[in-house]
């Protein structure tokens, strides 16, 4: 064993892996690594109390079937019983706000797949709370809250993170999962291909008079997609893409004016509407790191990639990263390899970068195809939607994609142990 390998093994017996960011992906990675016997230090900028906030902030996430299996392994899913809503059907249509929907529509029915729901909707607060609870119960995980990393360095034998108040932590490698635009990733030399969309994402939750029956609606409008996603009870999450100027006006409007705009897009299908929780808005962009790894360093989740929310796959791509990286590291450890070595980390990059790029560029193309009012493209879209609805094999492929069952799934997402 070389001196570098010996030093790496020594790090594994102490702090193990440094995880910079304790959100949904960073926390999940720490739990999965612990299940494989790998200790970690989770360093997060947020205070502990934020993970346990009970007030609903209006944000929710779609969890695909593979991601559900991952959360089951972590002991998180069972604790959320009663707080997740199955998506049994997806109805896709397009049109203009002033005209209503066109005749072309696409209906994904979960009964045609025999695999159960396409996914589940849950409020982010429930996921944050249960992941944090499991983190605090796990002896192989050290939690460091309210701490920002000022400097991250990698030597041949270890990674070291230094906080603004002078504390430092060393590990066999450091994983950056601080979200989009991570300054730590940029300072470490990671570069991204980036572009911004001429669109703003609006997120809100509504309570409605009629039951949603577990149906997710995706309306393709000239300004961008407008999704109504079912939550528990008579509630739905709105993921609304709009041009920046109208988006600012909608966000500045009072509650009743906001709901009036929602009714214009939804019609009366769910009856009377009320707003629940605050509204959120954020500029939409695409981002993909040229490299996910360097010696002793790796990117995970939104720090590595950010995609258009048109298909609601952002969190699921992050969970795929978690499962793939944990699988690579635990297999390397069992073989006696240095888990921070570049050749080990490149196995993770090979598994995830192409998949994330394909998904991100696919969503980019879909957004560009549907978010316009071109008469020619409207005709193409109508033909395409009708064709997919009538061709069973193609439709089943799209349904498998919607359920997150396509591609090279890591073992945990297939329901298999590490």
Image (cartoon, rainbow, N blue to C red):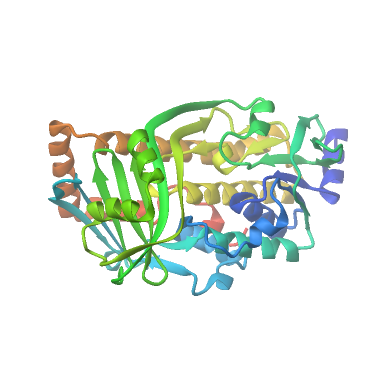
Residue 404, x across and y down, in percent? 42, 54
User: Which quarter of the figure has residue 224?
Assistant: top left
The residue positioned 75% from the left and 46% from the top of the image is: 17
Residue 408, x across and y down, in percent? 47, 48
* Total numbered labels: 0
The residue positioned 77% from the left and 31% from the top of the image is: 151
The residue positioned 41% from the left and 42% from the top of the image is: 201
Quadrant location of the C terminus? bottom right
Foreground pick, 353 / 163:
163
The residue positioned 68% from the left and 64% from the top of the image is: 134
- Compared with 126, 156 (above or below) is above
Q: Is residue 56 left or right of residue 380?
A: right
Quadrant location of the N terminus? top right
Residue 4, x across and y down, in percent? 84, 34
- Compared with 261, 270 (above or below) is below
Foreground pick, 75 / 251:
251
| Residue 255 appears in view | yes
């Amino acid at each position: 064993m070389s001196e570098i390998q010996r030093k790496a093994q020594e790090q594994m017996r102490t702090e193990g892996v440094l995880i910079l960011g304790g959100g949904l992906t960073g926390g999940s990675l720490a739990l999965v690594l612990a299940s494989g016997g790998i200790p970690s230090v989770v360093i997060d900028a947020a205070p502990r109390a934020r993970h346990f906030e009970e007030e609903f902030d209006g944000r929710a996430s779609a969890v695909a079937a593979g991601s559900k299996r991952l959360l089951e392994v972590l002991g998180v899913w069972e604790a959320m019983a009663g707080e997740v809503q199955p998506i049994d059907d997806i109805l896709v249509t397009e049109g203009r706000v002033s005209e209503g929907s066109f005749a072309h529509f696409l209906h994904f029915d979960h009964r045609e797949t025999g695999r159960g729901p396409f996914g589940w909707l849950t409020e982010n607060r429930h996921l944050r709370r249960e992941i944090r609870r499991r983190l605090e119960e796990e002896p192989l995980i050290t939690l460091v809250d309210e701490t920002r990393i000022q400097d991250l360095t990698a030597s041949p034998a270890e990674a070291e993170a230094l906080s603004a108040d002078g504390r430092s932590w060393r590990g066999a490698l450091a994983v950056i999962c601080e979200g989009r635009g991570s300054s730590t990733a940029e300072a470490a030399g990671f570069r991204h291909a980036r572009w911004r969309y001429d669109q703003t994402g609006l997120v809100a939750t509504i309570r409605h008079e009629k039951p949603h029956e577990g149906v997710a609606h995706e309306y393709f409008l000239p300004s961008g997609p407008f999704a109504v996603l079912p939550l528990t009870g008579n509630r739905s999450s709105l993921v609304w893409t709009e041009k920046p100027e109208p988006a600012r006006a909608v966000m500045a409007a009072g509650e009743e004016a906001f709901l009036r705009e929602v009714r214009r897009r939804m019609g009366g299908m769910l009856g009377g509407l009320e707003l629940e929780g605050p509204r959120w808005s954020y500029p939409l962009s695409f981002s993909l790191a040229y490299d996910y790894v360097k010696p002793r360093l790796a990117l995970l989740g939104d720090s590595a990639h950010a995609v258009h929310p048109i298909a609601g796959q952002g969190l699921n791509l992050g969970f795929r990263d978690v499962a793939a990286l944990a699988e690579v590291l635990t297999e390397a450890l069992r073989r006696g390899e240095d888990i921070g070595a570049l050749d080990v980390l490149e196995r993770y990059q090979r598994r995830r970068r192409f998949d994330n790029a394909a998904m991100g560029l696919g969503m980019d193309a879909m957004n560009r195809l549907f978010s316009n009012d071109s008469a020619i493209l409207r005709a193409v879209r109508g033909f395409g939607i009708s064709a997919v609805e009538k061709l069973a094999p193609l439709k089943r492929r799209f349904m498998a994609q919607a359920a997150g069952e396509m591609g090279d799934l890591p073992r945990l997402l297939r329901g298999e142990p590490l």
